[in-house]
Amino acid sequence: MQTWAGIKELVVPVKQGLAFLKTSLSASWSTAYEVRRKSFLRNRLRLTLWLALALVLTLVIYQFSRATTTPDPSIRWGLVVEGVLGLCLLTTLALLKTPLGQHYPEILFLGFSWSTILVPQIGDALIRNVELSYQIWIMTFLVQATLMPVHWVLHLVSQLSAPAFYLGVNALFGLGLDEEVFNPILYLYLFWFCLICDISVFLYERLQREEFSARRELEVAYQKLTAERERAEQLLLNILPECIADRLKHGDGTIAEQFTEATVLFADIVGFTQLSSHISPTELVILLNQMFSMFDRLVEKHGVEKIKTIGDAYMAVSGLPIPCHNHAPAIANLALDMQEAVARFNIEYNQSFSIRIGINTGPVVAGVIGLKRFIYDLWGDTVNIASRMESHGVAGVIQVSEATYECLKRQYRFKKRGKIPVKGKGEMNTYFLLEKQNLPPVSSLSR
């Protein structure tokens, strides 16, 4: 029972976290959709206002042409009403560019609707006309449902306000009611017309919501896919040079190249094997990871390619996969920095490690082998000799072959070790790399 209670105590926070995440995502989705809906309403309202202004302008032109030929006061009064309506529409259009229009386009939607319904109604009341102008209502509702199919509640408010305005204006001006008000067929007609408009708006907006939701899900899936692809590419770059990774992605089945000159480094941490019997495996791996991470940063600093690690051994090369002329100095600088890094590591972690390094220069073959867990590797006599320089070396010292010595002897200080027996090669001259020489300036040499 105690175990079950403990499990429940663990499950409850997880459920709460998932509920919070779901609520946050839902709120984020709703906010994003609301922003999109407001933008859609602003754009469609702007289009509707321009069309309404064009319609008012054509009516003004028509009424003006009639006024010049027919001396009817109602025509001139109609021009005044249409002019006032045009000013209302222009004002609403101008308000769209203000913060009010940016944050509350729904208010301007009602402003447009009420202007087209109320202004003609007031104009009729001023000339003592009680006629029910439901044709204007129908035109307004149809335009709104067609061009601005969002917020069906706004459409319903617009529709209910039309008869309310009619009754209110006529009561304000002491007018009676048109006989059409008492016609049940008219109410039935208006009911079904408005209902169809509202259903059309509701269905269109629901379609918009579903489309928006599907698009958001697609965007999220694409972002996840992009993130996973970038992660996969980064993982690939962690085990392969960038140019080799690009070739593999483009379908190169076999990658093998001959390089006429490169410099190879092998390094081994002396004392790590003995330490493994005194500390836990976890602590051992942590120490090794921290040290090799330092080496990785140095490799990046000197523009060298890390090839692999084998236990507590580290292998790097310069001069490939992109050939360069300074491959030997780059490896020499890396080796000297690795010695300093191990010294700092010993001080920081209270250890007594030393590093044995071997370097050789010459031609190598490089390529990718295998189908699973493949690596970019090196082969050839140059690699074997570099390995022997390390294994036949001395702890805390950088041993180089004669080929590497010839490349570096003018820039670095060496101590000749002499001939040593090398497995598979016989006796070979070797040297200990000590430090980089401080050469005098060129102007001093010329004197």
Image: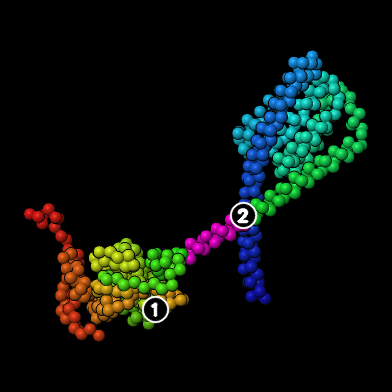
Identify which residue, 314 or 208, lies in the foreground.
208
Judged from this view, the residue extending furthest toward the left is 447
In the picture, measured across the screen, residue 211 lies left or right of residue 335, that is right
- In this figure, which residue is indicated by the disc labeled 2? 216
Q: From what the image shows, is residue 324 above or below residue 401?
A: above
What is the three-letter code of the residue carrying label 2?
Arg
Res. 164 in view? no
Q: From what the image shows, is residue 326 above or below residue 175?
A: below
Quarter of the view holding residue 298 = bottom left
Residue shown at the point (65%, 35%) measured from the top left: 46
Q: Which residues are magenta?
A: 215-232
Helix, strand or loop at disc 1?
loop
> Badge 2: how crowded within 10 Å, few (<14), some, or many (20+)?
some
Give the total of numbered labels: 2
Q: Is residue 217 magenta?
A: yes
Residue shown at the point (74%, 23%) measured from the top left: 62
Residue 429 x, y percent position in the rendering = 17, 78
Helix, strand or loop at disc 2?
helix
Identify which residue, 296 or 289, lies in the foreground.
296
Q: From what the image shows, is residue 38 above or below residue 9?
A: above
Label 1, label 2: how far apart the Cα atoms are:
52 Å
- In primary-sequence order, the first of circles 1 and 2 is 2
What is the three-letter code of the residue carrying label 1?
Ile
Query: Which label was assigned to residue 279?
Result: 1
Q: Quadrant where the N terminus lies? A: bottom right
> Badge 1: how crowded within 10 Å, few (<14), some, or many (20+)?
few
Residue shown at the point (66%, 74%) measured from the top left: 4
Res. 322 in view? yes
In the picture, measured across the screen, residue 231 lies left or right of residue 67, that is left
Residue shown at the point (86%, 24%) measured from the top left: 130
Query: Which label was assigned to residue 22?
Result: none
User: Magenta stretch mostly in which secondary structure?
Assistant: helix
